[in-house]
Image (cartoon, rainbow, N blue to C red):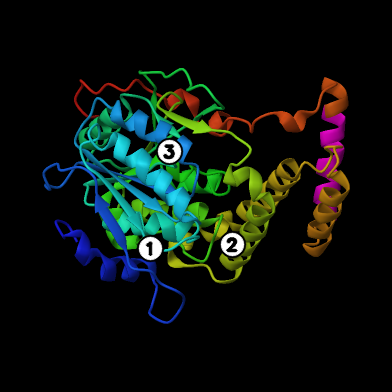
Amino acid sequence: MRGSSPSLLLPALFANLGLLPGSGPYRALECTRMSDSPQETPAISVVIPVHGRADLLGETLASLAQQTFRDFEVIVTDDSDTAPERAEIRRQIDDYAQRIPRLQYLFTEPRLYQAPNTNQGLAAARGKYLRILHSDDLLAPRALEIEHGLLEKYERRIGVLTHWLLRFKEEPPAWRQDPEIIFQDPARFFRLRAFAGPLPTSVIMRREIYDEIGGMQPDLRFFCDSEYFMRWSAWLHRHGLQLVELTPGLVGWRVHENHLTAQSWDLEFTEGRQTIRHWRSQSSDAFTSLVPEGYRQTFFHRADLLQHKRFFRKSHLLTFNGAWPARLAHGLRHTLSHGSAGIMLGLAAKRIRDALRRRRQPWGRLPTSPTRHLNRHAAQPLGLDQAPSP
């Protein structure tokens, strides 16, 4: 697909998405290249799946326009509902067409949801490295420069680079230009973070990973990122490669009311339970390579606990506002239907005890940083000006 004209992308896009004629309504692919830059293969492809929220997309594009590293392309892949929303997104793209070296816009049909919308952008990408950036998140000015430098420096050692995220609301976060790096074994990393893993917006990977494993699972609307995390971790493990984590400083993750995570807490729980049941009953070769038999019982016990803990926290079952009776009833239905009343009651008791101890509502806090799950003493400076470690 590299070097193909936009008019030739349609069959390849549908093939990558797993969509066949007759399985649903289709619209002709709208693919517009907004910049007139040379067509040689870029070092990095940045894929931005967008659904409405054109104002936030403008801030995301502004952060890309400020990058010190310039050998990248940007693919905005859109599944917004209405023509006015899409027109506003096109206007934002037009505003940045001269400031971003390669910029293009893709649209096939509305409401594709996260995985298919992201997949059509990945299918059109031509870069050596592929990066997803959500349309409400931001990159520090040196983010792509540092990512590219590390992936090139440790080319024989790593295949994926992930970030710990800086959470922010309105104002951009205070960037750090010198984050530390931590090398991780992919199998151990997956076992620790399978259900609290890196978000797509924090990941950049080699192109050959996508070429072999494909895109996200299209039938998962929310849990597609965790399932994709499992498959690329298995690819790294199979090829004897590691991944690198960067401590917070280069990627900003926006927290707001319209965030998918905030809106779909019940869907996260449901799809998470379905994924756990699938892994229990029909373990794939990829999953088996990451979680051998001796780790299974502990892994699934921890998965159950994490899923119910996150469900309890995100459903705000103890938030006594106007909607609390409906939320409580909904939460109890989930609890009883999955036979996990003991876990939920234990978590509820702990939450009440913590609230009384602190004399404030604890569910308003942001999730705990993943640093407590990791071997922090393994962190080391970036060292981009030094020779690679053996």
Which element is circle 3 on? Answer: helix
Residue visible at 20% across and 41% down?
A: 43
Residue visible at 51% across and 21% down?
A: 171
Depicted 203 relative to depicted 171: above or below: below
Q: Which residue is mark 1?
A: 108
Prevailing secondary structure class for the magenta stretch in the rendered image: helix
- Mark 3 or mark 2, which is nearer the start of the sequence? 3
Viewer-proximal residue among 122 and 157? 122
Depicted 313 relative to depicted 234: above or below: above
Which element is circle 2 on? Answer: helix
On-image quarter of the N terminus: bottom left
On-image quarter of the C terminus: top left
State the residue lying farthest toward the front. 84
Residue 179 occupies which quadrant of the picture? Answer: top left
Q: Is residue 291 left or right of residue 280?
A: left
Q: Which residue is mark 3?
A: 57
Q: Is residue 343 magenta?
A: yes
Q: Is residue 66 left or right of residue 376?
A: left
- Mark 1 or mark 2, which is nearer the start of the sequence? 1
- Mark 1 or mark 3, which is nearer the start of the sequence? 3
Residue visible at 21% across and 33% down?
A: 153
Q: Which residue is mark 2?
A: 275
Task: State the CA–CA distance, disc 2 to disc 3.
Answer: 31 Å
Residue 161 occupies which quadrant of the picture? Answer: top left
Instruction: Name the amino acid, label 2.
Output: Thr
Q: Are marks 2 and 1 in contact (CB under 8 Å)?
A: no
Q: Position of residue 193 (x, y in %)?
A: 54, 44
Q: Label 2: how many residues lie within 10 Å, few (<14), some (14-19) or many (20+)? A: some
Task: State the CA–CA distance, disc 2 to disc 1.
Answer: 28 Å
